[in-house]
Image: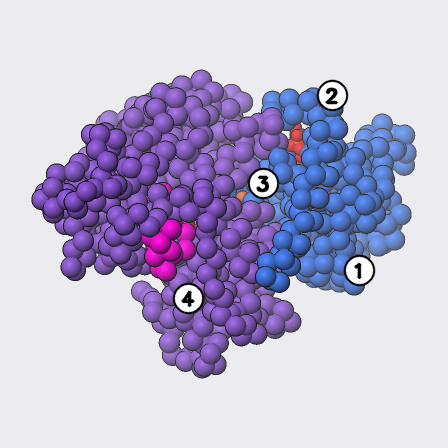
Chain colours: A blue, B purple
Amino acid sequence: MFPIVEAEFLAPDVKRFVIEAPRVAKKRRAGQFLILRLHDHGERIPLTIADSDPERGTVTIIVQGVGKTTKLLNMLGAGDAILDLVGPLGSPSHVEPFGTVVVIGGGLGAAIAYPTAKAMKEAGNHVVSIVGARTKELVILEREIGAISDELLITTDDGSYARKGFVTGVLAELIESGRRLDLVLAIGPPRMMQAVAETTRPRGIKTVVSLNSLMVDGTGMCGGCRVLTNAGARFACVDGPEFDAHEVDFDMLVRRNRTYLQNESESLKRFLEDPTRDLERVRESCHLEQRHPEVRREASRS
Amino acid sequence: MSAETTDPATPAVPPSKKDRMKIPRQHMPEQDPARRRRNFEEVNQGLTVLGAATEALRCLSCANPKCTAGCPVGVKVKDFVDLIVAGDYLGAAAKIREDNILPAITGRVCPQETQCEGCCILGNKFEPLGVGYLERFVADYERETGQVGLPERAPATGRRVAIVGSGPAGLSAAGDLVRMGHEVTVFEALHEIGGVLVYGIPEFRLPKEIVRHEVDAMRKMGVDFQTNVVIGKTVTIDELMGEEGYDAVFVATGAGLPKFLGVPGEHLNGVYSANEFLTRVNLMRADAFPESDEPVYDCRDRDVAVVGGGNTAMDAVRTASRLGAATSHLVYRRSEAEMPARAEELKHAKDEGISLMCLTNPVAFLGDEDGFVSGMRCVRMELGEPDASGRRSPKEVPGSEFEIPIQVAVIALGTSANPLIQSTTPDLQTTRKGYIAADPETLRTSKPGVFAGGDIVTGGATVILAMGAGRKAAASIHEFLSTGVWDATAAETPS
Ligand SMILES: Cc1cc2nc3c(=O)[nH]c(=O)nc-3n(C[C@H](O)[C@H](O)[C@H](O)COP(=O)(O)OP(=O)(O)OC[C@H]3O[C@@H](n4cnc5c(N)ncnc54)[C@H](O)[C@@H]3O)c2cc1C
Ligand SMILES: Cc1cc2nc3c(=O)[nH]c(=O)nc-3n(C[C@H](O)[C@H](O)[C@H](O)COP(=O)(O)OP(=O)(O)OC[C@H]3O[C@@H](n4cnc5c(N)ncnc54)[C@H](O)[C@@H]3O)c2cc1C
Ligand code: FES
């Protein structure tokens, strides 16, 4: 059982959680994720570790409510607990002094890109951050990302804040300005990452993306998270989640992520009609887990 | 055939050997195939007391029983069967537990026909003794009557052992080590304890309740189980032996890396590895969706093809049928005679109406416009000359390609070594294929204090072999902890 110690909304449907998980907090590096499960009927979902505090023994995640599990999670708050949480999973981002690094975060991708951007800055890179959102109120982590970036460029699709347009527009301008870009890191919806890959490809600018394939175990056991790269099929949970953007088959990623569309919408509809059952389950499951240490202690006494 | 015709449990005069040999092998009551092919309840229902007593009477009590030699962990078959004959079922269970701590599990999943029962001399003329049935019977009797006796623990030694992985190898090592008085922690990456027993082998063959029961018993004996810890990621082996203060580590991580065919279309939606398909259903209960949150691609009224011929393939194809598939094909490149699955599973699968497509190999998966699998292109195979292993090797029949419509496919070609631990423990020597190199007798690895066993050393094998490895490791770890001597030359790389 993993207690939630802080929870706050950053934007509508986007919530930041600080969770007690001392072992994970100690080990985690930028680019890694965790898998959690909310109750004993729940599914396992992957979420990037946005930050961690080894001293306090906590990890931070930022969650966008898109389907049943993330919406249920976003209903929990401080004092609640997560039944299962395992990590840190995946390979850490490759961080070194590259020179000028452009970090692009689309939508929630900003939260996923933030830890790596921070690590890039700490490694001595000149960090240019491009944050894109559909509209003003969905721009998240502006202050945090601003603080670790040498330059921060914001775009909104509808022009309600900062520049109107897509992140790729800003990126294309940067490239055309003739500046030397040593690495581009893009995280966001697959089609956005694909567009970034196509923008940097002609100039051969090294581009890294973090792939959000469907996962179950996260340890390389099920093969469900496989993505296609030039080197063949790879497991995103262990070989990734970061890959060379110019080698990824984005169509396959998008296609495989659609496998359960029908189940997902059915699940979400049922949940939204009556979320109390699932909320009860979270509390009951965590309570059950709480009793385990007792069982153990009794056993060792006898 | 009925066991209920006589009452041999209390014979006035013990029947003679000749009479005993006339008793037919008792039939395992099983759920009706027409019903069970659509539910996840256990297929085998277990012998009745009378059935078990009758079956036990068939044992010839050989002076030099071959069955024990045929058991990878040397269960004293004759002794426990004698106890059943004497009506002491709990004594019989205790006798098995001396060598096998998970009898309710092995009694259900061991390939008895090639082990104990395969060596039974009754089998020369009649049918062999139903050792597996009897083992299961006493273990169930013990559990159902709530009389599982916890073995005594030796006085605490103050030494601490970390076990990585909670499959049969890890569990049996934990059971032995805790009895020897050591402090034992089992680390498991998943949220549930049991390894393949919970995520791979389906409920209809091995109810999870039984695994949980065994795990609870071990918990009561003092084994500390920690789920959600991936050794190599959350904590490394070096940290276990350093900051976390363990005196020895037993690596029992299994062979969990799925193999794929490498044919076109294999990554279409609806094409699963057996591990994913079975994990979704067994561990995550996707069969109960939407009551459970994890989905599995809907098999209802669809055509499903499972590729392979081992236990895993058999489990996957029977699972597909239970998920409501219109047809469940088992596609295997050799003939039925070569199938590595347990004989009983093959029989059960056939009774459940599984369609066997032997001497057939897929060469491509075909997709619809949305990227979902819609068909499978296969070739027919024929068996050629025996190869080095003595098995006749399958060859493609030229020009024999054909297509069948399917909407779900499961690839069950076996697994290989998961590299997680090996890649984060640089001084742990591995074999060419990535398995951990360990001495076959002592299970010592190249890294002092670290032992390894089960599928991660042997490659995909059986529950009982993994348990045997766990016991060997426990004995070897105990010796190491008692003497403190680590013979660096002990570990050799098996070829
Ligand atoms: C390595 C990794 C890191 C991730 N990090 C974060 C994070 O930090 N914060 C966060 O909010 N989300 C993150 N995700 C995505 C998150 O896992 C999914 O949003 C979540 O699984 C959806 O679960 P659900 O039950 O709420 O929705 P579902 O009902 O499962 O899905 C609803 C809809 O969400 C989309 N979706 C489903 N699964 C994914 C997925 N794996 N990736 C992207 N979209 C998906 C689909 O369009 C689907 O129709 C990450 C995914 C991966 C693989
Ligand atoms: C579907 C299927 C059906 C089978 N049917 C039969 C049968 O009928 N009869 C039979 O005898 N055998 C059968 N087998 C084979 C048998 O299950 C295996 O040989 C046996 O389980 C191997 O045991 P093990 O302890 O070595 O590993 P496993 O059972 O594989 O357990 C390993 C455990 O370690 C965990 N783990 C892995 N890496 C880490 C890590 N880094 N940190 C923490 N934990 C980790 C895994 O999550 C897993 O729980 C079957 C196998 C499958 C897949
Ligand atoms: S999630 Fe199962 S192999 Fe990656």
Asked whether the residues under the numbered discs 1 and 2 touch, taking CB atoms below 8 Å apart as contact, a structural biologist would say no
Are both tags, 4 and 1, on one chain?
A: no
Label 3 secondary element: loop
Q: Which residues are magenta?
A: B90-109
Image location (x, y in percent) of residue B378:
31, 29
Please tell me how crowded label 4 is: few (under 14), some (14-19), or many (20+) other residues with Cα within 10 Å. many
Are both tags, 1 and 2, on one chain?
A: yes
**Ligand 1 closer than 8 Å to label 1 CB:** no
- Label 3, on which residue? A215
| Residue at image point 30% right, 57% down | B75
Q: Point out the tag, 2 or 3, that comes first from the N-terminus.
A: 3
Q: Which mark lies nearer to you, 3 or 4?
A: 4
Quadrant of ligand 3 in image: top right
Vertical side of A31 occupied by B395: above or below? above
Between marks 4 and 1, how big is the CA–CA gap? 38 Å
Which label sits on residue A273?
2
* Overall secondary structure of the magenta section: helix
Asked whether the residues under the numbered discs 4 and 1 touch, taking CB atoms below 8 Å apart as contact, a structural biologist would say no
- Label 1, on which residue? A56
Image location (x, y in percent) of residue B38:
42, 23
- Label 4, on which residue? B473
Between marks 2 and 4, how big is the CA–CA gap? 53 Å
- Whether the magenta-drawn stretch holds residue B203 is answered as no
